[in-house]
Structure formats: C-alpha cells, structure tokens
Amino acid sequence: MLFTLIILLIIFLGFWIIFSKKNINEIIDDVKNVNKETRNEMGELFFKEVKSGAKKKKLSNISKESDFVRLKTLFDEKKIPYYIETNYVLNFLLLRRFEKYVAIYILEKNYDEIIKIIEENKN
C-alpha cells in the first residue's frame, strides 16, 4: 500500500514538473509578447500623460482574449491612451495550471468617452 502511494506520488510530481515547465515557458513568451504590444503609440502617450500628472484608472480585468483584442482595436482606432498589464492566476479547479487575465488601464479623464464607445460597440 505504501509502495503504491509512493509510486503515485512520484508519477504526480513528474507530471506536475513537466506541465509547470511548459506553462512557465508559455508565461515568459506571453509576457514578452504583451510587452511588445504595449510599446505602441497609445501606450507611450498613456505613460507620458501619467508622468505629467494625469490620473490612471483600471478599466477591467479581461480573461477572454477576443474581448481584449476588440477593446485594444477600439482604443487604437479612437486614439485613446491605454496600458496593458498581464496577470496569471493558479487555477487547479479547472485542471489548468494558469489562467491569464489582462488588465487595461486608461486615463481617468477618458473614462466617460470610453464607456460611451464600449456601449456603442456592444453586439
């Protein structure tokens, strides 16, 4: 009985190490890609305004990639400054190692305009 438990524990740890390494590499790649994406005209403008004293506001946490892409496209089209931050959360309940959440920060002064744009572009 004890031998079986030890074998199962070793197998579990082996799978955990394999999947952890894969997910860590994916996370590193995602962070590199997001960093490239945030180095755009609107990201530069966002930081320039924040350094000048403008207040920032967290718009939302987004886990669905299509929503993120849609908002990013709308902000780029309307020339609205924004910043993208990526977070990862452990999620064992759904049998996935990590869940990716993207937070979008905007300037407080643009909040009303952004809400209006989002409302106009709802499906």
Image: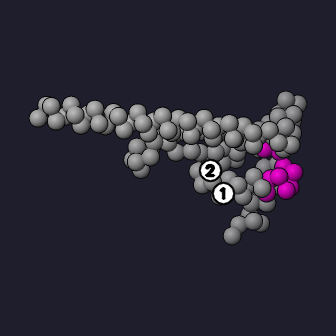
Say which mark, if any, is on residue 45: none
Which percent across, then down, holds residue 102?
Answer: 64, 45
User: Which residue range is magenta in the image?
Assistant: 74-83
Label 1: state its secondary structure: helix
According to the picture, the residue beneath numbered tag 2 turns out to be 62
Quadrant for residue 70, please give it. Answer: bottom right
- Between disc 1 and disc 2, whose residue precedes? 2
Q: What number of labels is visible?
A: 2
Q: Quadrant of the C terminus?
A: bottom right
* Disc 1 + disc 2, Cβ < 8 Å: yes
Q: Is residue 123 left or right of residue 82?
A: left
Question: In this orientation, does residue 53 appear?
Answer: no
Amino acid type of the residue tagged 2 in the rendering: Ile
Give me the residue at 35% from left, 34% from top.
14
Residue found farthest to the bottom: 123
Locate residue 33, reporting x and y percent. 69, 41
Q: Is 45 positioned to the left or the right of 22 in the image?
A: right
Work out whether 32 lies above or below 115. Answer: above
Q: Quadrant of the N terminus?
A: top left
Q: Callout 2: 10 Å neighbours few (<14), some, many (20+)? A: some
The image quarter containing residue 105 is top right
Task: Inspect the magenta stretch and tell me whether residue 37 lies in it.
Answer: no
Which label number is shown at residue 67? 1
User: Residue 3, image x and y in percent?
Assistant: 15, 31
How does the figure colour the protein chain or chains? one colour
| Residue 37 visible somewhere in the drawing | yes
- Residue 75 among those drawn in magenta: yes
Q: Residues within 10 Å of mark 1 (few under 14, many from 20)?
A: few
